[in-house]
Image: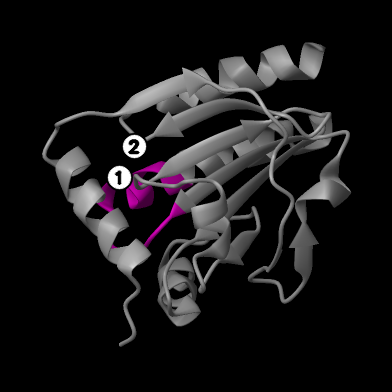
Amino acid sequence: MKTTRHTLKLALFALLLCAGLSSQAESIKGEAHDFTLKSNSGKNLRLSDFRGQVVLINFWATWCGPCRQEMPKLDELHKRYKRAGVAVWGVNVEDDSSLADNFLKNNPVDFPVLYDVSSEVSELYNVDAMPTTVIVDRNGKMRHLHRGYKPGYEKIYRQQIKELLKE
């Protein structure tokens, strides 16, 4: 199987996070990098087409335990806020999209999963931890960045989403 240097770096960082060394959450500023990726529905999704909505972008991999733990929580957020103008996207960072497809057969989610098989988008967003979550406001600005996942982070996501919906 082809393995990129970026994928190896992510795997190493994920191991460090799983060992309990650290996780980070921070406010960020700047224009969200536009990208287009194919989704598990077969459609191409482009971030700029979702201006006017809050977009939660979650970079994940099937080998990441915290990612697998977080998926149902993200699905709950998606179901709760999609009618309010919130899009939840899972961006799988693995070289082989069939790994994500196989995972999703046993762990289905209603939000779109996109495939970043070339790691271009994860590199564009400087993803250095698994999972990494970026929350983008209605104007296409990055507002929140979360590295790693621990139970309860979804409460923080919910609070940040509510604040961005009020703007």
Residue identifier under label 1: 66
Q: Quadrant of the C terminus?
A: top right
Q: Which residue is more in the foreground, 30 or 17?
A: 30
Check disc 1 and give the amino acid type: Pro
Dividing the picture into quadrants, the one containing residue 153 is: top left
Residue located at (47% from left, 46% from top): 126
Identify the element where label 1 is drawn. Answer: helix
Q: What span is in magenta?
A: 60-71
Q: Quadrant of the N terminus?
A: bottom left
Decide whether residue 64 is among the magenta residues.
yes
Dividing the picture into quadrants, the one containing residue 83 is: top right
Q: Earlier in the sequence, mark 1 or mark 2?
A: 1
Locate residue 70 relative to residue 57 in the image: left or right. left
Q: Tell me residue 132's x, y (percent).
A: 44, 42
Q: Which mark is residue 148?
A: 2
Residue located at (74% from left, 27% from top): 137
* Disc 1 to disc 2: CB gap under 8 Å: yes
Q: Which residue is more in the foreground, 57 or 2?
A: 2
Q: Which residue is more in the foreground, 16 or 58?
A: 16
Locate residue 125 relative to residue 71 in the image: left or right. right
Q: Tell me residue 166's x, y (percent).
A: 80, 12
Decide whether residue 162 is among the magenta residues.
no
Check disc 2 and give the amino acid type: Gly
Residue located at (87% from left, 50% from top): 49
The chosen color scheme is one colour
Of badges 1 and 2, nearer the viewer stands 2
Residue located at (38% from left, 60% from top): 61
Q: Residues within 10 Å of mark 1 (few under 14, many from 20)?
A: many
Q: Look at the picture and state if 48 lies above or below 54.
A: below
Residue 136 visible in the picture: yes
